[in-house]
Image (spheres, rainbow, N blue to C red):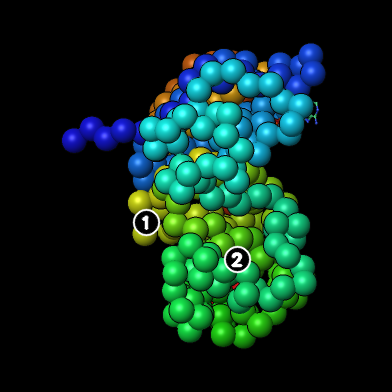
Amino acid sequence: MCSDPVLSVRDLRIKIGQLQVVDGLSFDVMPGERVCLLGASGSGKSFTAKAVLGLLPPNARTQGSIRIQGQEAIATPATQRPKNSRVSMVFQDSLSALNPLVSIGSQLREPFLRHHGLSRSAANDATVALLASLDLPDPQRLIKRTPAELSGGQRQRVCIALAMACKTSLMVADEPTTALDVVTQAQVLRALHQHTDSSASALLFITHDLHAAAQLCQRAVIIERGMMIESGELDTLITSPQHPFTQALVAAAHNVQPPEVVPTDYLKSV
Ligand SMILES: Nc1ncnc2c1ncn2[C@@H]1O[C@H](COP(=O)(O)OP(=O)(O)OP(=O)(O)O)[C@@H](O)[C@H]1O
């Protein structure tokens, strides 16, 4: 059975002043699919993510179409979007994504109370269960802490939990593993994988890291200077890259030893 895309981007163009940062980008993300937007630094990945999220700066001028669950969203900022076209997000900097003064529990209970109408005690149970599902140790104690009292990897998984609690059909994760060490990266990629496997949510993963993309995503859209240069199944792109940029990316990745697979039991213990 063929379903409609959760996200459909058509001929997206974004201009900041005189600079064309995205230049005619088109791609789809299907329900439950994990797609990465892969490109070098400055290729326009973050502006594309911001446009999908409805978080572009006021000086950005856009053209084209961004349909989320079939609804046109390109001109609608995040706060004004209807419930079914909201997108959850995970950013690189987990410290600034969370309120530093409010406990993890209070921040995570919020979507359950506000959006899903749960009682306080049911919201608390849902919060603890969510943190446990992401292999965070001792969630009952964790919810009493503030963000600064957590490690970077724990904090990023809390951000993923927060995005999961919003129960949207699409999550955008913009370089969520870039600032993390290899073990912590593996935990975060596993959490994102788990999220899409256990819910109907699709994922748009923004990265310049082919190893991370290959561990998580089924399909890739490769961009250069705001334009799509190649797209397809990641396995195929890695085994027979067509565009010189993709070939260089794959060659560079072969020269870097991929991180060794970290045993699951060890990941659960940290
Ligand atoms: N506030 C800004 N005003 C004008 N141009 C900007 C601004 N921020 C970024 N740019 C430019 O826009 C282009 C695209 O930036 P963008 O952040 O989308 O790239 P990116 O692919 O996400 O890069 P990175 O991986 O380094 O985050 C770059 O050429 C960048 O220099």
Can residue 173 be seen? Answer: no
Image vertical order of residue 242 relative to residue 176, above or below: above
Q: Is residue 239 left or right of residue 185?
A: left
Q: Is mark 2 within 8 Å of ligand 1?
A: no
Q: Can you give x and y, in whole percent of width and height, for residue 128 in the image?
A: 50, 78
Give the quadrant of ligand 1.
top right
Residue 259: give x, y in percent of width and height. 59, 52
**Quadrant in which residue 147 is drawn:** bottom right
Residues 58 and 161: in front is 58
Which quadrant would the N terminus be assigned to in this image? top left
Q: Quadrant of residue 100?
A: bottom right
Q: Are marks 1 and 2 in contact (CB under 8 Å)?
A: no
The structure residue drawn at horizontal position 54% and vertical position 18%, both measured from the top left corner, is: 64
Amino acid type, label 1: Ser
The residue lying at 44 percent from left, 36 percent from top is 68
Query: Residue lying furthest right in this view?
Result: 17
Q: Kindly indicate the quadrant of the structure image that contains residue 246.
A: top right
Q: Quadrant of the C terminus?
A: bottom right
Question: What residue is disc 2 on?
Answer: 158
- Element marked by disc 2: helix
Q: Mark 1 = which residue?
A: 199
